[in-house]
Image: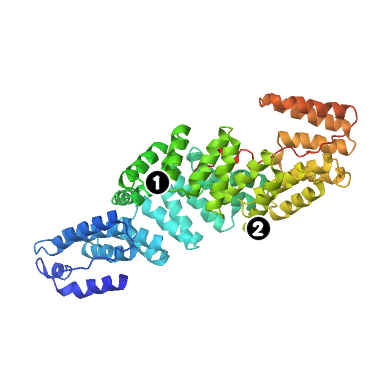
Amino acid sequence: MRVALLFWFAAAAGACGGGSPDAESEAAPTAALPDLSAADVFVREQVRAQHASLMAIVQTPTANAGRRADAYGDMGKLLMAAALHDAAEPHLRRAQTLAPDDARWPYYLGHLYRTTGALDDSVAAFNEVLRIRPEDALTLLWLGEVHLLAGQPAEAEPLFRTQLAMQPDSVVAHVGIGRAALAANDYARAVEFLEEGLRLSGQTAVGVHYPLALAYRGLGRLDRAEAHMRQRADVAILAEDPLMEELDTLIESPRAYERRGNRALSRRDWVTASEYFRRGLVLEPADPTLRHRLGTALFQMGDAGGAFAEFERTLQTAPGFALAHFSLGVLLEGAGRRPEAIERFEAAVRHEPAYIEARLALAGLLRREGRFEQALVEYEMLMEQGAAGDPRIEEAPFGHAITLVRLGRHAHARDRFMEGMAAYPDQPFFAHALARLLSGATDPGVRDGTRALALMEALPEAARSLDLGESMAMTLAETGRFGEAARWQRGAIERAMRGRRSDLVPDMREKLTRYERGLPWRSDDPVEFDPFLERSAGAIR
């Protein structure tokens, strides 16, 4: 299609009438519609209408070059908005030829090429914008972004620095410099600029957490890396872009409203997101994705009842929609209706066996309900289908080990924790849990206080939580250092009181009494803690 359209534009150069000789060579009397077979009915109608408007203008003898440029450009913008990129390109290029000093057309071409992966063409297009508008801040940012995508951090950083000199509080420029430094393995400078970008955003630029985690990992600061990795989100850090926002409003279709709503969700603008999803549902009331996303927005707005109703309505028209089953499971578990939640999680994985989050939720809830053998089966399936190092799968070997502890299979649990430490060396909770097991297991063949203490002392600062205080007390008591154990336990009790966790204090005092009497702690379940327990609370998305 792209070749055919380019051929049409070339062949039409001398076949037009009206205006100056140069203008005549740019007009065209006819043009075939692009292939719309993959577009939905709403897009097809809009493209046909825009095409008719284009043809009316290019066939008007008195239409000057500027008017024809706008007509071609408007057609290209609509096709670009509809993701018909091959069809959009020649229209935008024709607009650029007719109006070479109008920065809009190379700007849109720069984005089109960036989207399709033609990065060299994107660089050329954005450089053409800078020829017309040398100090265009947005273009500097986008050109820097394209250089980063092309693996050219040395070319990207000066562009971000130029924009930063123009706008010293630019979040995007700070993040861009940080990402360029990260790509160049300059981890300290990456942390400096990424942290400043996060600060300037008011901690809302959640997409910064992933590169920050990588930068801290490069510095060897695994505690900070883990803290940011836990907050990671797949959200781009973008500046406000009026031309692209204009493009975003052109298509009126269910999918277009879905995309707009999703972007609003990524900005945590729940109200706007819900409005977009509702507008999409007006056009396509039975669309399960739109209905589910509306429920997600309502949940984030605090309307759990409204969200529940939308998820149920989703399943009325799409009974196999796994996301809706999962989301209902999350809500039911939060409401204490665990048996019903298990049924929903089971339905989610039945309809979508590779749905990792749903199977994790199912395994965890089965474990918490005491259905240990069933939980083991789900965790084993997760470990079979997931790759080592996948942050979504790290919960599976941990949960599997915890379930083995609950079943009293302490030697097997120890081995599973050790495998988790090897597969996920940056996750301290495997070592933490193993140390507790080695300190307090009732199985004498598993207990190893010396090794437990070595594990605890090697944990990073980020892991030194309330649980760690108790763990240190356990390991010290197991090695016979009861006075130190009692001091650690008293400190843990004080932190529990300050943290308003008085519900934990009676059991903690029981342990303290044993240490004061010179007795170690023994338990069928010495691990006790679960770092993933609260994960499902924010799982609806």
Mark 1 Cα shell of 10 Å, populated few (<14), some (14-19), many (≥20):
many
Residue 128 makes an appearance in the image: yes
Q: Residue 152: x percent and y percent? A: 49, 62
In the image, 150: left or right of 466?
left
Counting from the top left corner in percent of width and height, residue 303 is at 45, 32
Dividing the picture into quarters, in which one does residue 85 lie? bottom left
| Viewer-side residue, 136 vs 284 | 284
Q: Earlier in the sequence, mark 2 or mark 1?
A: 1
Give SS at disc 1: helix
Disc assigned to residue 384? 2
Give the number of the disc on residue 132.
Answer: none
Choose top left, top right, bottom left or bottom right for residue 50.
bottom left
Please report the residue visible at 83 percent of the width from the left and 39 percent of the height from the top: 440
Q: CA distance from mark 2 to mark 1?
A: 32 Å
Q: Is residue 26 above or below residue 261?
A: below
Front position in the image: 337 or 446: 337
Q: Where residue 259 sits: x, y (%)?
A: 38, 49
Instruction: Say left or right for 402 vs 345.
Output: right
User: Where is mark 1, residue-wise?
Assistant: 290
- Amino acid carrying label 1: it is Leu
Q: Amino acid at mark 2?
A: Glu
Q: Is residue 93 above or below residue 340?
A: below
Q: Nearer the viewer, residue 475 or 34?
A: 34
Tell me, yes or no, if residue 167 can be seen here: no
SS label for mark 2 = helix
Residue 27, position as x, y percentages in the image: 16, 67
Quarter containing the N terminus = bottom left
Residue that appears at 17% across and 58% down = 53
